[in-house]
Amino acid sequence: MAAKQAEFARWFSSLTATLNVDTSITKYQNTVTVTGEITEIMIGIPEYDSATDVLFTYIGGVFFIEGDEYTASGAGNAAKITLVKNLRGVNTVTFVVLKNVIGQSVLAAGTTYTSVDGLITNSISGLVTNEEE
């Protein structure tokens, strides 16, 4: 196992040195006013995906904690939060989404990348496998 970890460390070091990472964080924000007694609120940010993006939710200016006070689900126009407790009255809800965007120049030119047993490998540093030594 130690030999595999060492090989992975060498491979990962080579990969990170080879990659030209063109990445940035993009911020999206939407504010809605809700009335009545509700538990579900549409996020209203078409670029949002609950599986990959970071969501910050503020209700009446107070930060709500995902997993404790609400859950987020869906993507795009179908994305919503479901509150643990009903919201009553007139409230302003602000959603802030952070999305990691990786550009087109991520892979280094002239390098071949392959997936083997779920591991990403490249032709420069050799093949990493899950076989026992």
Image (cartoon, rainbow, N blue to C red):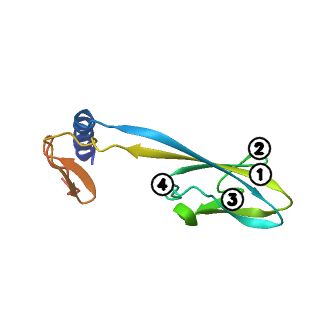
Q: Residue at x 47, y 40 (%)?
A: 25
Q: CA distance from mark 3 to mark 4?
A: 17 Å
Quarter assignment of residue 20: top left
Which of the 4 quarters of the picture holds residue 105?
Answer: top left
Q: Amino acid at mark 3?
A: Tyr
**Chain-order first, disc 2 or disc 1:** 2
Label 2 CA crowd tier, 10 Å (few <14, some 14–19, many 20+): few
Q: In front of the other: label 2 or label 1?
A: 1
Q: Which residue is tagged 3?
A: 70
C-beta proximity under 8 Å, tags 3 and 1: no
Q: Is residue 76 above or below residue 22?
A: below
What's the amino acid at mark 1? Thr
Question: Which residue was labeled with disc 2?
Answer: 61
Q: CA distance from mark 2 to mark 1?
A: 8 Å
Q: Earlier in the sequence, mark 3 or mark 4?
A: 4
Q: Nearer the viewer, residue 103 or 127?
A: 103
Q: Nearer the viewer, mark 4 or mark 2?
A: 2
Spatial CA span between label 3 and label 1: 16 Å
Q: Is residue 32 left or right of residue 75?
A: right
Q: Amino acid at mark 2?
A: Gly
Q: Position of residue 40 (x, y in %)?
A: 70, 66
Q: Are marks 2 and 1 in contact (CB under 8 Å)?
A: yes
Q: Which mark is residue 92?
A: 1
Q: Could you say which is closer to the camera, residue 57 or residue 92?
A: 92
On the image, numbered disc 4 is attached to which residue? 52
The type of residue carrying mark 4 is Thr
